[in-house]
Amino acid sequence: AQRVTQPEKLLSVFKGAPVELKCNYSYSGSPELFWYVQYSRQRLQLLLRHISRESIKGFTADLNKGETSFHLKKPFAQEEDSAMYYCALNTGFQKLVFGTGTRLLVSP
Amino acid sequence: DTGVSQNPRHKITKRGQNVTFRCDPISEHNRLYWYRQTLGQGPEFLTYFQNEAQLEKSRLLSDRFSAERPKGSFSTLEIQRTEQGDSAMYLCASSSPGRSETQYFGPGTRLLVL
């Protein structure tokens, strides 16, 4: 079965604290994973993809095939990082399977 | 604004009525996707077009749902005989194929079926 699991509905941290948003996937093929973000009153947008191996807005994510995970990390959270974060799996032709999302709340 | 646009942004209808939503993708994008998002869930794939061809449909897309992309540009999603369970945010996304293919999402159409 193709599935993406984000176990935390809400993650609340203080500004400057490290952040890790968890994502686990189930997929029989070679996975292609993404993190999408939705800021308040804005549309869903791509944050990063695993094949790019890049850091966007200080966020990084490493694909761990052994643990079937793609956790999103940032060493020092900022208030502007507060948003809804979705992990997504490409199951072919860019048909994305999304997790249920994690709301990140960064308090001053 | 050259992003993906969707109309209407909100739709309230009575159970049993038909509704139609429109999506205008980014002009050079030949791939177009429809997703549905209910409260507390992530977006769920409904269907996908490459140019005017509808290449895949989810099992979520019952017979009451139909999507078209007649000229390979804008797309419409029609729901016939709406049910309360159809209440959701309907999202459209478009992309251009390539190794760094990115889906760009529209703002969505929020449907409420009374």
Image (cartoon, coloured by chain):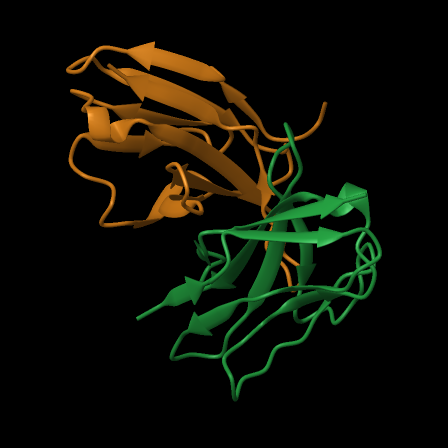
Q: Quadrant of the N terminus of chain B?
A: top right
Which chain does the orange colour mark? B
Q: Residue at x 34, y 11 (%)?
A: B12
- Is residue A48 something one can see in this rendering? yes
Q: Is residue A67 left or right of residue B79?
A: right
Q: Is residue A33 left or right of residue B1?
A: left
Q: Quadrant of the C terminus of chain B?
A: top left
Which chain does the green colour mark? A
Image position, residue B44 (x, y; %): 38, 47
Image position, residue A65 (x, y; %): 54, 84
Image position, residue B104 (x, y; %): 61, 42
Q: Quick one: A104 or B8, which is closer to the camera?
A: A104
Q: Residue at x 70, y 54 (%)?
A: A13
Q: Quick one: B113 or B21, which is closer to the camera?
A: B113
Q: Residue at x 36, y 68 (%)?
A: A2
Instruction: Tell me if residue B41 comes above or below residue A8 in the rendering.
Output: above
Q: Quick one: A34 or A82, which is closer to the camera?
A: A82
